[in-house]
Image (cartoon, rainbow, N blue to C red):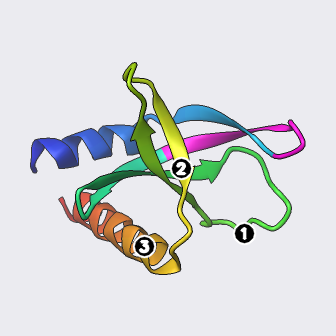
Amino acid sequence: MSDDMKNIYELMKEYEVIVLEDEEGNEEEFYEIARVTYEGKDYICLEPVNEIEGFEEGDLLIYEIITNENGDEGFKTIEDEEVIESVFQEFLKLQEEIEND
């Protein structure tokens, strides 16, 4: 198993909780399920900690990870549905590799 796969495996064993704020200022907690690199960009896959209206079990939020000049990470909404689907497929491949290891 590569070091990248080991890192993702660790993330999947011990979920980090990330708090996101919606447009109305409401905070929601999400588990960081994995980080995926696709076409030279990094993405984060998040799953709600608590039930959220409109989310079904297994649904994920996927954001591009951006880093500012201070090295702080932030998340950028992905507009392109094809990129979202491609990143999700990469996530599924990584998950399958982990399960088969």
Disc number for residue 56: 1
Give the answer, above or below, for where 35 lies relative to 83.
Answer: above
Q: Is residue 24 magenta?
A: yes
Q: Which residues are magenta?
A: 23-32
Label 1, label 2: how far apart the Cα atoms are:
22 Å
Q: Which element is circle 2 on?
A: strand
What's the residue at 18%, 45% (across, down)? 4
- Determine crowd level at label 3: few under 14, some 14-19, many 20+ residues with C-alpha closer than 10 A: some
Amino acid tagged 3? Val
Establish if 48 lies above or below 17.
Answer: below
Question: Looking at the rendering, which quadrant does residue 41 occupy?
Answer: bottom left
Q: Earlier in the sequence, mark 3 or mark 2?
A: 2
Q: Nearer the viewer, residue 78 or 20?
A: 78
The residue most toward the top is 70
Q: What residue sits right under mark 3 in the picture?
A: 83
Q: Nearer the viewer, residue 14 or 89?
A: 89
Q: Nearer the viewer, residue 11 or 73?
A: 73
Q: Residue at x 10, y 50 (%)?
A: 1
Image check: 86 left or right of 93? right
Element on which disc 3 rests? helix
Magenta region, main secondary structure: strand
Q: Which residue is mark 2?
A: 76
- Whole-angstrom CA distance, mark 3 to mark 2, is 13 Å
- Residue, far front: 69
Q: Position of residue 11 (x, y in %)?
A: 38, 39
What is the distance, in whole Å, between disc 3 and disc 1 at their CAs? Answer: 21 Å
